[in-house]
Image (tube, rainbow, N blue to C red):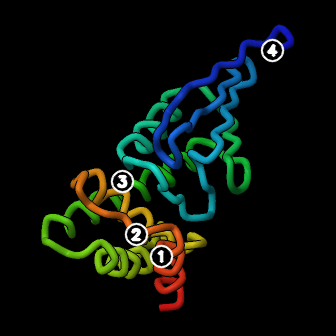
């Protein structure tokens, strides 16, 4: 673009089905779109979480100093790591609760309490999004899992945030 190399890298599905990042190598910059939510809770409409975690790992392997997220302030590798760590935590916790036979909404409420007590995640905004994120894990683990419609998912996010 204008004599400058710009790389588009597809990393989805993760947040949605068509996630991509934009790398500008000579500026040591990556534009992440909705792959990074800095200071807020990511929401996994599509998933699986493993794709999103892999996208974070890919970005961490890039030679970039400046990270422009889709949500929140400009950051660096620490911002990528924070999102990756949150997603890995959710994936692990949701998988354990799925294996134990918990309903997805019960699992989300349980994990929300763990997030609230977690030093690294307790300050994230929109923490009720855990309801949607757990649904993504459950769908990945069991393709027959029926995720509720969007209205119900928003109701569940609100219920979790209301306590």
Residue at the spot x=55%, y=37% of the render?
18
Distance between the alpha carbons at the discs numbered 3 and 1: 25 Å
For mark 3, does the 10 Å Cα neighbourhood hold few (<14), some (14 to 19), or many (20 or more) residues?
some
- Residue 148 is labelled as 2
Coordinates of residue 132 in the picture (x, y in percent): 44, 65
Q: Which residue is mark 4?
A: 1
Residue at the spot x=62%, y=63% of the render?
39
For mark 4, does the 10 Å Cα neighbourhood hold few (<14), some (14 to 19), or many (20 or more) residues?
few
- Residue 42 is labelled as none
Q: Does residue 65 appear left or right of residue 105 in this picture? A: right
Badge 2 or badge 3: first in the primary sequence: 3
Q: Which residue is mark 3?
A: 88
Closest to the camera, between mark 2 and mark 3, is: 2
Q: Does residue 120 appear left or right of residue 94 in this picture? A: right
Q: Which residue is mark 1?
A: 152
Distance between the alpha carbons at the discs numbered 3 and 4: 35 Å
Closest to the camera, between mark 3 and mark 1, is: 1
Look at the numbered discs 4 and 2 and tell me whether their residues touch, using CB distance below 8 Å.
no
For mark 1, does the 10 Å Cα neighbourhood hold few (<14), some (14 to 19), or many (20 or more) residues?
few
Look at the numbered discs 2 and 1 and tell me whether their residues touch, using CB distance below 8 Å.
yes
Answer above or below: position of 24 versus 12.
above
Answer above or below: position of 102 versus 57.
below
Q: Secondary structure at mark 3?
A: helix
């Amino acid at each position: 673009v204008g004599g400058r190399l710009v790389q588009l890298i597809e990393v989805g599905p993760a947040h949605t089905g068509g996630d991509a990042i934009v790398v500008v190598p000579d500026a040591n910059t990556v534009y992440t779109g909705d792959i990074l939510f800095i200071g807020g809770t990511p929401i996994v409409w599509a998933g699986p979480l493993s794709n999103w975690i892999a996208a974070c790992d890919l970005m961490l392997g890039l030679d970039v100093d400046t990270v422009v997220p889709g949500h929140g302030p400009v950051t660096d590798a620490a911002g990528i790591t924070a999102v990756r760590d949150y997603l890995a935590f959710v994936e692990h916790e949701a998988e354990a609760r799925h294996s134990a036979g918990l309903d997805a909404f019960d699992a989300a409420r349980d994990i929300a309490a763990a997030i609230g007590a977690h030093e690294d995640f307790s300050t994230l905004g929109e923490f009720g999004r855990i309801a949607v994120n757990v649904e993504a894990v459950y769908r990945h683990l069991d393709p027959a899992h029926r995720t509720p419609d969007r209205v119900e998912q928003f109701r569940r996010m609100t219920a979790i945030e209301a306590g």
